[in-house]
Image: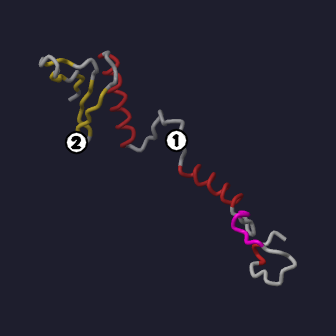
């Protein structure tokens, strides 16, 4: 059973029961009650949003990917690829930040950390 409605609330200033300007929809999907705001003041748009939401839930439950996937999100494979590329550049063998290198003088016989020396 699908229901598109405007919830009521009690106005604290006046004490009257008022109806919200925003439409909500409510339906049951696989035994779960879905109740969400349509974020609109027009009933026909609220009905269309409810239909789109139900269709998205049905598609996702059958393994069909969402058509309206946000463009800002990357897949895990894309993130791993970019991470590994950056890791190769930043973690080359023998390269370390200059702040981690110990002071070493080529003429000094007491240089115990030859691998940190830039020479």
The residue carrying pointer 2 sits among few (fewer than 14), some (14 to 19) or many (20 or more) residues within 10 Å by Cα, namely few
Residue highlighted by disc 2: 31
Q: In the picture, residue 43 is in which quadrant?
A: top left
**115 w.r.t. 68: above or below:** below
Q: Which disc, if any, is residue 30?
A: none
Name which of mark 2 and mark 1 comes first in the sequence. Answer: 2
Q: Can you give x and y, in whole percent of width and height, for residue 17 in the image? A: 13, 19
- Residue 63, given in percent of the width and then of the height, sits at 41, 44
**Against 96, is 1 above or below?**
above
Instruction: Pick out the residue farthest to the left.
Output: 15
Taking the image as shown, residue 108 lies to the left or right of residue 41, namely right
Q: Position of residue 16 (x, y in %)?
A: 12, 17
**Image: magenta residue range:** 97-103
Nearer to us: label 2 or label 1 = 1
Residue 92 occupies quadrant: bottom right
Q: Nearer the viewer, residue 50 or 99?
A: 99
Kindly identify which residue carries mark 1: 73
Looking at the image, which residue is at 22% across and 25% down? Answer: 3
Q: Is residue 82 left or right of residue 49?
A: right
The type of colouring in the image is: secondary structure
């Amino acid at each position: 059973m699908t229901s598109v409605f405007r919830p009521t609330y009690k106005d604290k200033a006046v004490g009257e029961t008022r109806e919200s300007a925003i439409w909500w929809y409510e339906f049951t999907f696989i035994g779960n009650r879905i109740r969400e705001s349509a974020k609109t003041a027009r009933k026909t748009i609220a009905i269309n949003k409810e239909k789109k939401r139900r269709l998205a839930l049905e598609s996702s439950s059958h393994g069909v990917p969402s058509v309206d996937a946000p463009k800002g999100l990357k897949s895990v494979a894309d993130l791993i690829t970019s991470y590994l590329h950056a890791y190769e550049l930043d973690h080359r063998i023998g390269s370390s930040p200059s702040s981690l290198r110990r002071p070493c003088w080529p003429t000094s016989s007491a240089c115990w950390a030859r691998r940190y020396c830039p020479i």
